[in-house]
Amino acid sequence: MAYALLDEDRTLGEALRRIAGEQIDEALDAIVPGHPSRAVHEVRRRTKTLRGLIRLMRIGFDEFADADAAIRAIARPLSETRDAKVMLDTLEALSHQAAGKAARHMLRRIHSHLASEREAEREAERVEDLLDKSKDRLRALKARAEFWTVDGDGWDVVGEGAAITYGHMLKDGARALADGRPQDFHELRKHVRYHWCHARLLRKLWPEEMDARAMVADDLAHTLGHHHDLAVLNARLVKDGIHFGTGEELAPVFALAERQGSALEDRARMLCERLLAESREAFTERWHALWKAWEAARA
């Protein structure tokens, strides 16, 4: 079924159990031998949709903190494996943007070092072990999710959940765009992804409106994701640069990464202006009106 509240959901608790069960099943189905990269991507994706789901219900969901911690425990180890692959992808993307021979040569040298056969074999073994542990944790989470309940119903629950996330986006967006710190952009990205979840979960309120918001949120989340990937690569080069070359040799790579980061920040600013044009109060009032119209149509 759909990752959305449906007309046939009698209560929020019923919707929560249905959607959570479906997302967990999708994650479990993705963990198959021989496809570790796909499995990691799919499990991480489903943990994000699960965290977005429980945040929409958080006001009436007494087990929110425990559920969120359990989902984080599944996602966090796999996030570290993602960083290893993403650094290679980021190096390749930078290579396409590099104008000078010095930068391209250094990028190839770094890529070759990080993609060494020994490192790849070691990483593959670790990923398989982590996926086995993820499968056990997902099964345990599914057993718990079958008994999840939501106290209260209707807009009082989901409206507050959506408003909390939107408020975080307003605050984090203002701070990130003012200060430009990588950690602030990363924090903004998390709440943008939850907002994307909420637009999809509440699609029935007004499909065209929610699809448009989800599209912009998805674009912003990917833009911020690329910005984070550059920050991860930059931190690795600062930490282990001596293994790749001298400071003079690395300078063109740092300069290229800085230019790309600035371009991504410009795009993030433009997308934030579209997604965050309303105050929290105006946003909540408008979505509440859509909720009431949907409830009236269901009745």
Image (spheres, grey):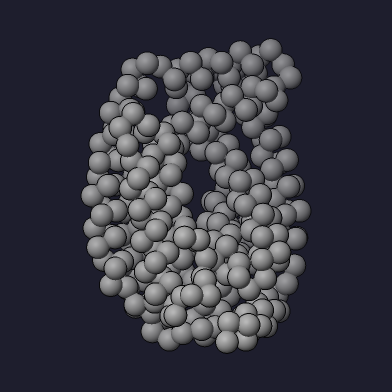
Q: Residue at x 58, y 82 (%)?
A: 298
Q: Residue at x 46, y 31 (%)?
A: 85
Question: Vertically, is 147 above or below 219?
Answer: below
The picture places residue 189, in percent across and down from the top left corner, at: 57, 54
Image spot of residue 137 (x, y percent): 26, 53
Pinpoint residue 207: horizontal percent, then vertical percent.
Answer: 66, 66
Taking the spot 43% from the left edge, 72% from the top edge, the residue there is 15
Q: What quarter of the picture does the C terminus occupy?
A: bottom right
Tell me if residue 277 can be seen. yes
Vertical placement of 222 versus 189: above or below?
A: above
Q: Is residue 279 left or right of residue 160?
A: right
Q: Is 285 on the left-hand or right-hand side of 57?
A: right
Q: Height in image: 256 above or below 1?
A: above
Q: Is residue 58 left or right of residue 291?
A: left
Q: Position of residue 79 (x, y in %)?
A: 41, 43
Image quadrant in which you'd find residue 24: bottom left
- How many numbered tags mark residues here? 0
Nearer to us in this view, 180 or 40:
40
Residue 280, by quadrant, is: bottom right
Residue drawn at x 55%, y 57% is 193
- Is residue 178 in sight in this rendering? no
Nearer to us in this view, 204 or 289: 204
Is 298 or 256 nearer to us in this picture?
A: 298
